């Protein structure tokens, strides 16, 4: 093997290693940037969560998800009761109006 082949092969290996190192550095920078964005996102989400928990405590007395689910179920049941009461009330009015119309506007 000629002597000049060894230095050329070593130079090729060095060039390949430098290229690999450059690619690894670029990958590291990409990962570092992604990590910084992820950390910023987590910080923002934690801030929003704290704000929403504070609003829930102020508005509903708790930020516990299970307690809020129970409260929501209670409010839905109350709304259903109120709608049913209002519907009965309107039917009563309609019945009285129909009675007045049947008698020609004369009191019974």
Image (cartoon, rainbow, N blue to C red):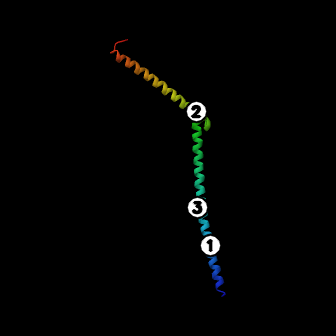
- At x 61%, y 35%, the residue is 67
- At x 58%, y 52%, the residue is 40
Q: Position of residue 15 (x, y in %)?
A: 61, 75
- At x 43%, y 20%, the residue is 92
Is there CB contact under 8 Å for labels 3 and 1? no
Q: Quadrant of residue 24?
A: bottom right
Q: Which mark is residue 71?
A: 2
Q: Which one is nearer the viewer's eye here, 8 or 106?
A: 106
User: Looking at the image, is 27 positioned above or below residue 48?
Assistant: below
Is there CB contact under 8 Å for labels 2 and 1? no
Residue with the most extreme front position? 102
Residue with the most extreme bottom position? 2
User: Looking at the image, is 88 positioned above or below residue 35?
Assistant: above
Q: Position of residue 4 (x, y in %)?
A: 64, 86
Q: Provide the residue designation for mark 1.
A: 18
Q: Could you classify mark 1 by the number of other residues whose Cα lies within 10 Å: few (under 14), some (14-19), or many (20 or more)? A: few
């Amino acid at each position: 093997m000629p002597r000049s082949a060894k230095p050329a092969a070593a130079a090729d290996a060095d060039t390949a290693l430098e290229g690999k190192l450059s690619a690894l550095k670029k990958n590291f920078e990409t990962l570092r940037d992604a990590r910084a964005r992820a950390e910023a996102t987590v910080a923002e989400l934690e801030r929003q969560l704290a704000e929403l928990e504070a609003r829930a405590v102020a508005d509903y007395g708790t930020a516990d998800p299970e307690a809020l689910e129970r409260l929501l179920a209670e409010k839905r049941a109350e709304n259903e009761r109120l709608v049913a009461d209002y519907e009965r009330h309107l039917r009563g009015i309609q019945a009285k109006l129909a009675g007045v119309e049947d008698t020609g506007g004369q009191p019974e």
